[in-house]
Each structure stands twice: as structure tokens, then as C-alpha cells.
Amino acid sequence: MEEILKTIASDIFRQDEWGQKAQYIPELAGIDPRQFAISVCLKDGSLYSAGAADKPFSIQSVAKVFSLVAALGRVGDQLWTRVGREPLGNSFDSVLLLEQENGRPRNPYVNAGAIVTTDALLAGRAPKLALAEILCLIKHMSDSDSVYINEAVAASEQKTGSRNKALAYYLQSHGNLYNDPELTLGTYFHQCAIEMTTAQLAMAGRALASLPCAPKVISHLRARRVNALMMTCGHYDGSGDFAFQVGLPGKSGVGGGILVIAPNVASIAIWSPGLNHYGNSHAGTRAAAMLTRATNWSIF
Ligand code: DON
């Protein structure tokens, strides 16, 4: 594994095309896209990395996986009365289908679906309690205390978040938001601003890969379902292409992170902040494809 990751990293660093930076907040627009890290956690608990695996990055929409796990833990399958399980085929912050589908977002990994999931997790509490629950869960899953929220990123998200605010109020108009939209949005913006390293993220994914070394935070059945949605919806309108290239469930974020799950085999985290036209990591997707080719880990 060490050799495979070394080869992938040197191949990635030789490339000329790194993709575009996320432009919508200065904290992400200022990051050099020519960076890369990959970490792989195997069944026996061993962790292998290459590149800047100890550098924290903004996990952004990768947090949607953890808030989904937390919300399912809190409200169970009832969540599915409020959020669907179908891919969208539009961009991650699209409002288009919400009107046609009466305010029930297509899936928990698009922004509208994640806002509903966060609302279910909030459940009348103070936002800081729901955020503490997500952070505690991630710390427990990654076996690490140094996972944190970048307050400057959260404030920028809040400032530029008109589209997410529109989604939240639209959901409220359909009766699919139970808390004050500003409180749900605050919780959502803060979870997007969580920062961690690929080493920590690969460790956090162990439970979803159902690795024996993982803490028991989710049942096998639920992990399979969370992964199934990562496969079909985890890369927004680029999900089909990610499945085609990589062949494993993955969840991306505009910070350039990708969590990839090889069920019963490995948990993989990749970071490279340059994005492709879907808003997913350009080099990260390439590296994930190289990894599954080298290991035969594709589920197909
Ligand atoms: O809510 C937003 O739009 C961002 N904070 C997160 C979006 C995101 O990561 C989409 N990922 N590809």
C-alpha cells in the first residue's frame, strides 16, 4: 500500500492540470490548488498516507455524511419521510426540483437535503448542541480530538449563503423545516466549516466501511445505505462519472476533499483543492481512480 500511494502521489504531482479553486469564499479562493494528500485505512487498522496527510482542510460537503449518520441515529428511518434517496442530476445547490416535488429534497447529499437532515438533528436544541454532537461523532469515529470548526469559514459561508438561505426558507414554506431557518442554517454553515486531515478522515470512514477496527457507531445495514447514497448521489451531477472512473461510493466537498469507502476492505480520504466542472476535486478523482485500478477494489 505504501508503494501504491507513493506512485499515485508522484503521478499526481507530475500533472499540469489541477482544476479551479472554489471561488465563493475568500478562505477557499486563497488556497493553492497544487496540493495533494491521500490516506488509506485498512481492515487491520493500519493507516497509510502520501502527500500532505497531516494538513487540515475544509471538509465542506463531506460533513453531510456525518450529519446524516448523526440524524439517522437521532430520528431513525423517519428521516426518509422528509428527504428522498434519488440522484438529482442538477448542481448541488439547485432549487429546480424542490418546487415540483413539494419541498422534499431528492437526497441528503444535496444542499437542500442536508439542510433538512441538519434540521432533523437540531430538533429544537441550541445549534451549539447539534454541532457538538456532529463534532463528537467525528472525533469518536476518527479516534482523534483535533477536529475543529473554522469560525472564519463559517462566517464567510453565512455571508455568501443566499442560495442556501433561499433553500431553507423554501423548505419552510413547504412545512419541511421545523426549526427557525436561521438556526438550521447556522448549524449547516458551521458543519461545512469543519476542518480535518486526510489521515483523520480515513480513520473516520472506518465505521462506514464496516472495518473490524472501527468504533461501533452505525449498524451494517445503515452503513450500507449511507454508502449506497454516496455511490448514487455523493458527487452531485458528477456521481455517474465518479462511479464510472472509480467504482466505489464517495462523497466530495468543494474544499477538495473526497471520502471513499471500499466496503469491508478500506476507508480512503483524498484531498486536492482544485475542482473539476462539477465542483469535485480534479486530482482527487484521478487519484481515487488510480487507487481502485491498482487494488481492484471497484465493487463492479
Ligand atoms: O453549502 C455550500 O454551498 C458549501 N458550503 C458546501 C457545498 C459543497 O461542498 C458542495 N460540494 N461539492
Image (spheres, rainbow, N blue to C red):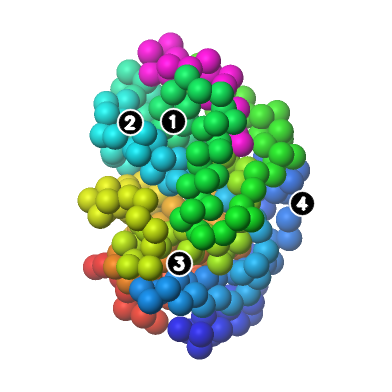
Q: Residue at x 36, y 46 (%)?
A: 233
Report x, y in % for residue 256.
58, 56
Q: Quadrant of residue 10?
A: bottom right
Q: Amino acid at mark 3?
A: Ile
Report x, y in % for residue 263.
30, 64
Q: Which residue is mark 3?
A: 268
CA–CA distance in space, label 1 to label 3: 26 Å
CA–CA distance in space, label 4 to label 3: 26 Å
Q: Is residue 153 visible?
A: yes
Q: Which residue is mark 4?
A: 30
What label sits on residue 239 in the rendered view? none
Image height of 62 relative to 129, above or below? below
Tell me the quadrant of the picture where the C terminus can be found: bottom left
Q: Amino acid at mark 1?
A: Leu
Q: Amino acid at mark 4?
A: Gly
Residue numbers of the magenta segment: 172-190
Q: Residue at x 57, y 50 (%)?
A: 59
> Looking at the image, is mark 1 or mark 4 nearer the viewer?
1
Residues marked 1 and 3 touching at CB (< 8 Å): no
Principal SS element in the magenta part? helix
For ligand 1, tell me if the residue under mark 3 lies within 8 Å: no
Q: Which residue is mark 2?
A: 75
